Image: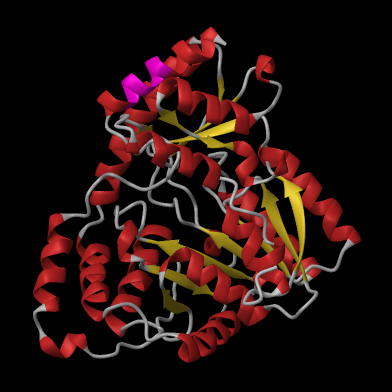
Amino acid sequence: MNKYSNKLIENFPDYLFNKINEQKLNLRQTGEDIIDLGYGNPDIPSHELVVQKLIESAQIKKNHKYSVSKGIHGLRNAISKKYLREYGINLDPGRNIVNTIGSKEGLTHLLMSVINKGDNVIVQDPSYPIHHYAPLIAGANVIKIECLSIDGFMNNLKKSLKNEKVKVVLISFPHNPTTLTVNQEFYDELVELAKIYNFLLINDFAYSDIYFNEVKPPSLLKSDPELEHCVELYSLTKGYSMAGWRVGFAIGNENAITSLTKLKSYIDYGTFQPIQIASTVAINDLDDYPKEVSSIYSERRLLATEYLTKYGFEVQESTATMFVWVKLPKKYNNDSMKFSIDLLSKSNVAVSPGLGFGKFGEGYIRLALVENKQRIRQAMKNFVKTSNSD
């Protein structure tokens, strides 16, 4: 045991994707060209207007000082106006919004600010790994519910709520990794459950701006206009292609936002102020850019799914996210890790094994659409050629 590590950290398993990441690195060091569809790191650049505003703001010396952990007023006001014009939701920038350093930081500190040790938190399985571990960091007892279909998740949730006292239900739609989406009626039903069982609903809304066929994902907050039971985590990472900027928000219930704001005031001084100023420009002036970004991902998704379905892979239908969720044929014995490692070594294509997102992700793989169409086309050719040779 590492003497400078506590029991919680020691009990965290090794990050399941590390094995594949190490193999990618080793292959690249030998000169191999790896087409990486495993790591959801956007390749589409941030908008030039935002970059220029960052440069301009960074040249103003007063912007080099400490900022405020909850975010400058202009930034919080911008996200308030965005929610009003896009979802019809009224928010008070001072009481219902706090700027976070991306969704992962926001989620972890939000849970730390509302959870008492031993409280039950329901999470989806499969799900983005921080959804499994942020509750543990906060001291919660984690209850994992299968989320491979919307009806299945809702039915299992209702059963769990009848059997356990739950403090928080953590969801994420559009969903990573499965790409599942929901409608407003689904949220209406969830909010009714929150009223009955008195729990806080947290929706990681990271993929809200990546959608196709004009099917815009709804906001959870629309189903809870009084903001009694809900918090939503919003991010500029995907829709505005600003991953490294680390700009996110926790939005919703005043008590939860107050608790998070208080905790963050002891931990950080927020993001670099020029980043906040540039992000304000993105939110206020670039509503069309996420649509451009979505169009690029839509074309890539269509290309990838055409190859996969042609060669017998079952692909989850979806109108959102930058991912493709693929069920492995029976001949691979539901071993997503072995499939992913073999695929990388034989075809130089990296994907994410479903097991890395939870036990119910086994038997699936996730593809991130973060290479251009030419590279994706080549990846799919390598993919199906290798798969058919097994």
Q: Nearer the viewer, residue 114 or 271?
A: 271
Indicate the position of residue 35 as horizontal and vertical percent values.
35, 31
Q: Is residue 46 above or below residue 27?
A: below
Q: Quadrant of residue 2?
A: bottom right
Magenta span includes 231: no
Q: Is residue 52 above or below residue 241?
A: below
User: Residue at 34% of width from left, 36% of height from top?
Assistant: 28
Q: Main secondary structure of the magenta part?
A: helix
Query: Tag count in the figure?
Result: 0
Residue 275 horizontal side relative to residue 93, left or right: left
User: Residue at 37% of width from left, 86% of height from top?
Assistant: 269
User: Residue at 52% of width from left, 14% of height from top?
Assistant: 387
User: Residue at 37% of width from left, 58% of height from top?
Assistant: 86
Q: Nearer the viewer, residue 338 or 122?
A: 338
Residue 246 visible in the snapshot: yes
Q: Is residue 147 above or below residue 202?
A: above
Region rendered in magenta = 376-382
